[in-house]
Image: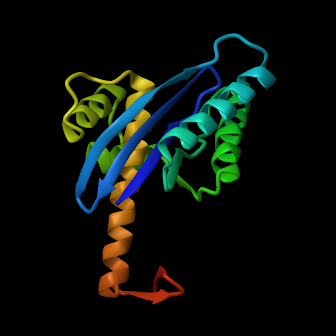
Amino acid sequence: MAIILGVDPGSRITGYGIIRAEGRHVQYIDSGCIRVGEKPMPERLQTIFHSLATLIGEFRPEEFAIEQVFMARNPDSALKLGQARGAAIVSAANSGLAVHEYSARQVKQAVVGKGGADKSQVQHMVQVLLALSSRPQADAADALAIALCHAHMSQSVSRLVAGGGAGGKVRGGRVRQL
């Protein structure tokens, strides 16, 4: 059984989602948004860092998953997103958590079944998969989707390691495709 903290980083709103995964069973624990608004960038990063550190201290996750950076059309936006990711990653690393990164396409594929899904499809599937009474806010839903993706990917790797893998060889606890 693992508690997974998923993070959807943003320079104004950072979504977080916490689930418990045991085999194929997943259970919702908590989710929400860290809203930093229009503060100067150093204060935003500090808020993201400390807010995640507080969540990590409260919920004690064993796993941390975050969305990878994508190339935005606006370089300034990409830079700010990268800084928000950095604050989140350092918060996790300071707590001794390994950082697992997934592309937006991987997350959508794992949760919706197609890598080009839109936000409303992700929200709907997160609501269904976690048996939530209502749709979570978009950034929280994305964070929960990242946590669900990590749970799915971790289970797939565990099955490969346990079974010797589909054409893979186990070396040092990792599966390597030949």
Q: Look at the image and tell me in which quarter the N terminus lies.
A: bottom left
Q: State whether residue 166 appears in this view.
A: no
Q: Does 14 appear above or below 63?
A: above
Image color mode? rainbow
Question: Percent x, y for residue 44?
Answer: 71, 22
Residue with the most extreme top position: 38
Q: Please indicate whether residue 45 sits to the left or right of residue 123 in the image.
A: right
Q: Residue at x 64, y 57 (%)?
A: 96
Q: Is residue 120 left or right of residue 92?
A: left
Give the residue displayed 49% in from the left and 82% down from the top. Answer: 173
Residue located at (41% from left, 34% from top): 142
x then y, percent, for residue 21: 32, 54
Foreground: 30 or 40?
A: 30
- Nearer to us in this view, 48 or 170: 48
Q: Nearer the viewer, residue 86 or 112?
A: 86
Q: Check the image and report above or below for 157 versus 46.
A: below
In the rendered view, would you say 139 is above or below 7?
Answer: above
Residue 29 % position (x, y): 35, 38
Tell how many labels.
0
Q: Residue at x 30, y 75 (%)?
A: 159
- Residue 69 screen position, x and y as percent: 60, 42
